[in-house]
Amino acid sequence: MKMELLAPAGSMVALDAALEAGADAVYLGLNNLNARRGAQNFSQAELVEAVAKAHERNARIFLTLNIDLATREIGETARCLQLAVDSGVDAVLFADAALLKLKEYFPALEFHFSTQASVTSSAGVRAAARLGIKRVVLAREMSLAEINAAAEVGRDCGVEVEVFVQGALCMCVSGRCLISSWGGGRSGNRGACTSPCRVRWNQRRKKLDGNISKDNDLGTLLAMRDLCAVDYLAELARMGVSCVKIEGRLKSAGWVHKAVDLYRRAFNGEGVGVELESELGAYAGREMTAGYLEEKPQEMTGEYGRPAAEESAEDDEQVISPEVKLNNNVLEYNLEIISEGEKLVVTLSCESGVERWEQVKTLVRHAKRAVSLEEAAAWLRNFKIQGAELDDFACDDKEFLLPRKAVNTLADKISAALHRLKKSKSKKSVEVEVSEVVRDLVRFNRDTEFNPSQLGHKPNMVRLEWEQAEEFLAEVSPELVVVEKITAEDFAHYKEIGKNSKLAVALPSVFFEHELASLREFCAKAVEAGFMIEVNGWDGFELAKESGAEIIGGPGVAVLNPLAGAALSGNGFTAATYSLEAGQKQFEDLSQSFPLPGILYVHSRPLLACTRAVVTNEERLSLEDSRGIRLELSNENGLCYLRATEPFSIAHIKNENIKARYLCADFIGAKKALKEWNNLRKQPKNANLFNYERGLY
């Protein structure tokens, strides 16, 4: 079987460009439920047209439904799948476990694990086979040797593997990043990432006088270079990789055509490396790298800037034949801020319309910590909001100061305004009929049999690092304890100090091929000791399943809808974690119909990102960006972890409509776990509620 060349299409003109340049397959999304909400995307009618165009050229169409799905989106997801069948779509890319249940009712479609499913080893490929999945898009962090191991296992168990070869790289392992959600409720796992990894970060340091210094500018240390693996196509083909993929649904039709054309020529044996660097690299203004493939993770990050050279229509016409119309597909918005008495009047305009709102002026107590309107505009230009870039900015007082929280509020209001304008411009809902059996499947009954506890009750579960466990368990005996960073040599002691609780050990959320043997042994010894195993990814699920363990789902496989819970239950999970990103209404919808024991995190410093890139040689750093987002960076065992500095806590909130079996207090990263435990249900000052009040977008 020849290796497939898979191209992105964020619009119909990009689809035309990809097909014109020789793509074997094209992946695209509808106007909702896909991980590139900022793209123009495809309407229901356009999807039908796109499939017809592709099939006419003997190319395939893959539909992306690759986000974490909320309860109220499951019916729409089923209709999207029916539309895919009716339109002749060839495959669906997904990450949410709900589709493991839905796929049984749509046998005409292939189902592929998206890179958002975070498969990082051959164990994840075995898990895909166990789950009946046709293909896995491997994590971009894998080396050539690791891809080879995954492809070899795939051949043995009938699962194809797909590999990214060109385009932007996420700093974090895909599907694992919560930074954008943490900073403003716009989740990268739901297609709304604001690219906080592209901004500048400062180091937080405590000075001798006890004050915190934030004047050490670390630059854009989390900003990744772009991937370019054109030199490894022949090697990937020899390994048995089924498909190579180009990232770029937010890029122009001209860029897509150039990328596909260059890779098609490389498939045919032409040397295009230098041309590719100049043609594609200049567009993004970033250096290119194959560092992960080459096991050179120190060559992944670099200074981030705006594009060094923009494409012109004349350049595009030299590449694309006349019948392919060009459209940059980059939405821009304009912003005007006028001071009127005690308020700021903000006007946002874009091609979809105009929105206007008022924002109360906030007292600035510390001018050095504030941001001028001019600086706020410069910061907003660093990233896209709802896929749109700030173009013109006007104000009547560019030196007017805003507290950083007010800048965050402004960004949130811009996001909401752009979302409303985009939504009003095009009808998003898919209108097709699904079968009665599918309607029954996605019609959730209120059922709290498994989940008697309410938000506001005393937590009955804790999550600890092993070094915290002895002191904590000497004073407290929660119903369930999960411990991280424990070795098999400590199992007997753990069993002794935790004798009054049910005990579990956690598998890491990210691990790679060289760790499989030791983790398999760890799982076997955990089962022998009588511990449950908390899994945090599909790779870990496979190892725990092989060991015969009782499995609970941790935050790495957290769910946002009851159907995903049902899928986990059907695959042997005895409890599952609610998504830490959820807002109040999403928690209520999820928990009222959850079909197995649920775990609600009420206190946590969540792991916000995990990367294999070497972003610093420091073992630990405290980071803060211009919006006041604070992260604790630690380098451990070849991975860089970014955890929230301060915890979120909703333990003090009472809500009888949010139910769970376990209310979990997570003390990973806490310096004084017992003290935090004793203060959990007190009303904290300036409590961080994560997305509970503001909601998850």
Image: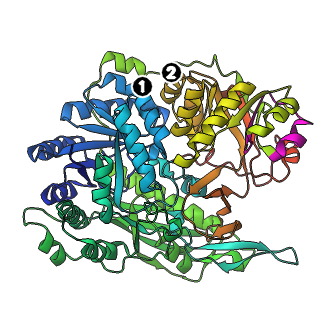
**Is 278 left, or right, of 173 in this rendering?**
left
Locate residue 86: give its quadrant.
top left
Q: Position of residue 40 (x, y in %)?
A: 29, 55
User: What's drawn in magenta, residue-wise?
Assistant: 467-487
Residue 555 can be seen, yes or no: no
Q: Quadrant of the N terminus?
A: top left
In the rendered image, residue 354 lying in the magenta stretch gets the answer no
Disc 1 target residue: 101
In the rendered image, residue 477 lying in the magenta stretch gets the answer yes
- Give the residue at x 44% y 69%: 225
Locate residue 573: give its quadrant.
top right
Disc 2 target residue: 570
Q: Amino acid at mark 1?
A: Lys
**Is 527 left, or right, of 684 in this rendering?**
left
Sequence-wise first label, 1 or 2: 1
CB under 8 Å between discs 1 and 2: yes
Q: Secondary structure at mark 2?
A: helix
Up-down relation of residue 73 to residue 307 (above or below): above
Q: What count of labels does the image hold? A: 2
